[in-house]
Image: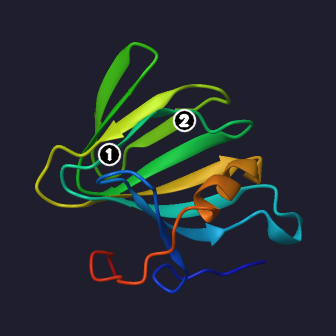
Amino acid sequence: MRVVVPGHGAVRRAPLPLGPSVEILVDDQDGAELAAAHLTIPAGGGMPEHTHGASAALLVMLDGELRIRGGGREATLVPGTLVYVARGERIGLANGSDRPATLLAVFAPADFIRTPARWPAVTDRTDQPT
């Protein structure tokens, strides 16, 4: 068993303007079969269409509002919304609001977590939720 308290781990930011920051909560170390991350997408920010490689993803909207698009569909995510993203499925996220949006992302298998683990480290956590 691993107990993780968000807000205490290293934070990394996608290398693109107004890209998301991510705190990796569970990585693929020690044989973990899934990975989890806490994502913050700044106001006006987002993530262009992308896949999660060999991993499927479960996204749980925690705070704020996001638009998700993929496969010719688009939806608004509000707190409590769950999204299942199949392996190889392309999605994009956009935060059109004036405040940050946060979500929990779970990846299985854990392989995809290696991508945000390579993003640049964030040294100023003032824009991160506590």
Rendering coords of residue 3 (x, y %): 66, 81
Instruction: Give the distance between the C-alpha atoms of the residues marked 1 and 2, in whole angstroms.
Output: 18 Å
Residue kind at label 1, given as amino acid type = Gly
Residue at (45% x, 56% y) in the render: 14
User: Furthest residue to the right?
Assistant: 31
Q: Give the label on residue 46, or none.
A: 1
Q: Quadrant of residue 28?
A: bottom right
Q: Quadrant of residue 35?
A: bottom right
Dot 2: within a 10 Å radius of its alpha carbon, few (fewer than 14), some, or many (20 or more) residues?
A: few
Left or right of 124 on screen, residue 51: right
Image quarter of the C terminus: bottom left
Residue at (35% x, 83% y) in the render: 124
Rendering coords of residue 74 (x, y %): 32, 23
Residue kind at label 2, given as amino acid type = Tyr
Above or below residue 79? Residue 57 is above
Above or below residue 21? Residue 110 is above
Label 1 or label 2, whichever lies nearer to me, is 1
Dot 1: within a 10 Å radius of its alpha carbon, few (fewer than 14), some, or many (20 or more) residues?
A: many
Residue at (51% x, 74% y) in the render: 121
Secondary element type, mark 2 = strand
Q: Give the label on residue 127, or none.
A: none
Above or below residue 112? Residue 127 is below
Rendering coords of residue 98 (x, y %): 10, 56
User: Furthest residue to the bottom?
Assistant: 8
Q: Give the label on residue 84, or none.
A: 2
Secondary element type, mark 1 = strand
Left or right of 35 on screen, residue 79: left
Residue at (60% x, 71% y) in the render: 25
Q: Nearer the viewer, residue 84 or 70?
A: 70
